[in-house]
Image (cartoon, helix red, strand yellow):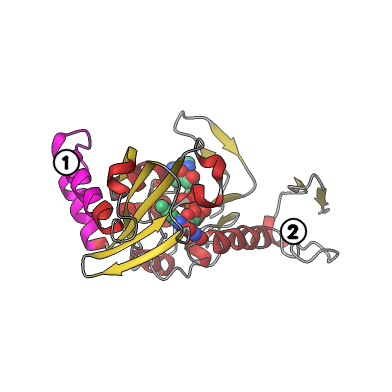
Amino acid sequence: MRVRGVRLASGEVIRALAVVMNADLLAATSRLIEPSAWPADFAAKLDALEPATSMFSVHLAVRGAWPAIPPIVHLSSAGGQVEIVCPSHVDPTACPPGFSTVELMRLVPQDEAREWFEAFAARTDGEVYKARKTAEADKLIALAEEVVPDLGARIVGRWEASPLTFTRYTRSTSGAVYGVRGASIAARSPVRGLVFAGSATHGAGFEAVTISGASAAEALLPGVLARGTACKARAEWGEGVREAAWRLPGGERWRTSWGG
Ligand SMILES: Cc1cc2nc3c(=O)[nH]c(=O)nc-3n(C[C@H](O)[C@H](O)[C@H](O)COP(=O)(O)OP(=O)(O)OC[C@H]3O[C@@H](n4cnc5c(N)ncnc54)[C@H](O)[C@@H]3O)c2cc1C
């Protein structure tokens, strides 16, 4: 079994020698490719995976400067936990002068995330869903006021994000914000020409997923990470493919060809 390209939602087919699958692993491996394509042992491995933790967050536009506290504060008190982040504290261009941008976040375990989906997946434009989001955000704001006492009074704009919101924007399974729990999938998939990238292979976080991109390239083109070494691409591409060319992000061109 090997990949031949991708079919877009519009029906358009884009032929490709290789496909890098970076979308949410659980969703992509079950919906973007026919699940019967996976060998049984790999299918069993996928079945055992669970989505990682989700999140509830509220994003605030706040009048006035940020107080003299760090731009990121992890608050854990009797009232609960909240991460308080003020991006405009380190990047003043994030908002107009005289205002601050503030994000309040709480990790949501999967049991709780599933409750959101069971209750509201069918309808996120209803008043009950909005009220639940407002109540959750109010709790985070009240908690953050232990650090920034006048925070609530200074809010001029607020946008809540529930586990459903994270799925809406990233198509993640069950609102997961950190991919799959205990990610350990190899970049090279059992389907020839198909490699994985993203948090499924190297874990969540910007650094890990950046490294995962390099690993995906290496899986497709062994030796590409070691400049000056011979390219051993033929074994990857298989019979019938004679030539391939790449343009690297810096503009440099790579051309590989082989006879036979
Ligand atoms: C609120 C929040 C805060 C975070 N804060 C931090 C932080 O401070 N530091 C840190 O290191 N990490 C942080 N993370 C985690 C970090 O963002 C992720 O680990 C990382 O972005 C995962 O990268 P990825 O490439 O695996 O997936 P993603 O960044 O989710 O990329 C996958 C892409 O695939 C697209 N996609 C999915 N399905 C399809 C489809 N069917 N067709 C086409 N496209 C599709 C999605 O739209 C998305 O653009 C945070 C995450 C969240 C949600």
Is label 2 within 8 A of ligand 1 (CB to nearest ligand atom)? no
Image-quadrant location for residue 47: bottom left
Q: In the figure, 254 relative to 130: above or below?
A: below
Quadrant containing the C terminus in the rendered view: bottom right
Q: In the figure, 131 relative to 178: above or below?
A: above
Whether residue 151 sits left or right of residue 73 in the image: it is left
Q: Secondary structure at mark 2?
A: helix
- Residue occupying the point 39% across, 50% down: 103
Residue mark closest to the camera, 2 vs 1: 1
Instruction: Identify which residue, 189 or 142, lies in the foreground.
Output: 142
Percent position of residue 166, x then y: 36, 47
Q: Secondary structure at mark 1?
A: helix
Whether residue 121 sits left or right of residue 227 in the image: it is left
Residue picked out by circle 2: 234
Q: Identity of the amino acid at label 1?
A: Ala
Percent position of residue 212, x then y: 58, 61
Q: Indicate whether residue 126 is drawn in magenta.
A: yes
Among numbered discs 2 and 1, the one appearing first in the sequence: 1
Write down the region rendered in magenta. Answer: 111-139
Instruction: Identify which residue, 174 or 19, lies in the foreground.
Output: 174
Q: Residues within 10 Å of mark 2 (few under 14, many from 20)?
A: some
Q: Indicate whether residue 201 is drawn in magenta.
A: no
Percent position of residue 178, x then y: 41, 60
Principal secondary structure, stretch drawn in magenta: helix
- Residue occupying the point 57% across, 62% down: 207
Q: Is residue 56 visible?
A: yes
Residue picked out by circle 1: 131
Q: Identity of the amino acid at label 2?
A: Arg
